[in-house]
Amino acid sequence: MNSKPIAATGLAWAVLSLLVCSQFTEKAIAADPGLKLEAQLIWGTNDPQSPDPSHKPVDSDVLKKLAALPLKWSNYFSVNRKGFNVPLTTTCKVPLSEKCRMEVKNLDGTRIEIALFGRGEQVLKRSQALPKGEILVLAGNAPNDTAWLVTLKRIE
Amino acid sequence: MDYDTQLQLQAYLDGELPERASRQLRVWLEEDPEAKALLAELENTRTLLTHYDEGILLPESREFFWSKIEREILAGRKPASRPGRLSVFPGLRYLVPAGSLAALVVATLLAVQGSGGSKGSEYEATLSDPGALTYRDYASGTTLVWLSYPAEHELADDEPSD
Amino acid sequence: MTECDHSSADDQVLVRAAQKGDMPAFETLVARHRDKLYARAYSMMRNEEEAIDLSQEAWVKGWQRLGQFQGESSFATWMTRIVINLCLDQLRRQKRHRAESIEAMAEESGGGGVERQMPVVTPNPTAGLERAELRQRIDRALNQLSYEHRTVLILHEFEEMEYKAIAKTMDCSIGTVMSRLFYARRKMAALLANLKKEDLT
């Protein structure tokens, strides 16, 4: 029995299949640009300046959004800022500080799942849509009557 | 000491053991230091909890508290069944100075009452995390999730240092 | 019109008057027992606003059910049972599972609970602590219990209910009550174990 032609045919089919799949995969990847997001760790205070000179006041568009919220602080300083891309059905880990990180999963191209961690422990998990132009703010109390805030928005 | 024995010890402390079993246990306690120590720990915890809620006072004035009850009674309404949401304004004391609170309450009530598709703002509490209060401002496209943990929480150390 | 002064009347008298529709008498009962009822609701719910809402609801229910109060227990106890049941209903609706459900499942399955292996703790209960500070620490520790464990602890330690009554209130077996109570006590002991005066100065 001559098995070589059978093996060769099988191999050819396998190679052809891979080529086809990779074409589809490449197209799929090209079709899914992922979600471009920006996360920012912010310090909220009524002090006019941050004791850390590297912390600049937040951009005006973020400030405008924060001003619309029922928060009692008038000044917000950017502690850290990260831009990242989250492909479809992928989870990105975004460290924002030594103790704080965020994990963002792109659920379906418009909805995301966010998990917030403090010292390794999950403090919040939430799913929601995040359309362009909108912002999600996670926040809580910080010492000395200040606040920590983590913002997430889509960027072009 | 096995688990059933530990529970027996607890039942003895709580006066839930029948007399005969209590007598046997007392004999055993005399001879087993581990059991004695566990009993002491359980008793200590009970002591610590004594009078725990004495001094917890209702944080509303007599008149204000009663007026809401009286209104419900006179209306003859049965208390509304609770859909599993927190009352509308928990955690607000963290968000606004007390002086603005009344104005915000009224404004938000109006906004919530007026909603039903209309833009405004609303509060909700997520069942999955009772420590979180969500505030949504439709006009600015902003969602705030406020985590009402104390300032010593894990995330709070990111305050800039001097 | 003559107004009655209810402030010196005992509960029995006030209840009888309220059962006849005397609202001021009921208001006096509310004023007299509102802190206790609120404290119970707060200890269970761990949330001020919820505790206020539920204690108000309990008072309204109390008024509506006054005809059913026969005096087998004290009025305060009767009202406390109403607020406890309201709190339990609310807690069940909220279904605060999270990590608590893992503890509950481990317990229900009879698996080796952590409380069985915990080293015995010998806290010094008084250690110069002021009551307010002690209450704060207990508050924080109670917050770390699941609502099932916390409720069993509260019903037993504060309401002095027997295992059987707790089981009926919580709709579970006596065995479950015993193991939850044991877990709650041991966990509280561990959480409160490092109560030292110097930590609080």
Image (tube, rainbow, N blue to C red):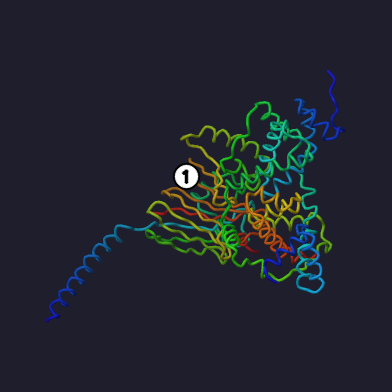
Image quadrant assignment for residue C195? bottom right
The answer to whether residue B74 is left or right of residue A106 is: right
Q: Position of residue C177 (x, y in %)?
A: 67, 56
Q: Amino acid at mark 1?
A: Gly
Figure check: B65 above or below A5: above
Query: Is residue C198 visible in the rendered structure shown here?
Result: no
Q: Position of residue A117 (x, y in %)?
A: 55, 61
Figure check: A65 above or below A78: above
Q: Position of residue A134 (x, y in %)?
A: 45, 48
> Hey, which residue is sitting farthest top in the picture?
C1
Q: Which residue is mark 1?
A: B141
> Hey, which residue is sitting farthest right in the picture?
C8
In-front residue for pair B3/C199: B3
Which residue is pictured at 56% across the width and 65% down the height? Answer: A120
Which residue is pictured at 23% across the width and 64% down the height? Answer: A23
Q: Quadrant of the C terminus of chain A?
A: bottom left
Tell me the chain of label 1.
B
Query: Is residue C111 visible in the rendered structure shown here?
Result: yes
Count the labels in the image: 1
Image quadrant assignment for residue B40? bottom right
In-front residue for pair B11/C190: B11
Figure check: C71 above or below A67: above
Query: Tag 1, which secondary structure?
Result: loop
Which residue is pictured at 46% across the width and 35% down the height? Answer: B117
Q: Residues within 10 Å of mark 1 (few under 14, many from 20)?
A: some
Q: Quadrant of the N terminus of chain A?
A: bottom left
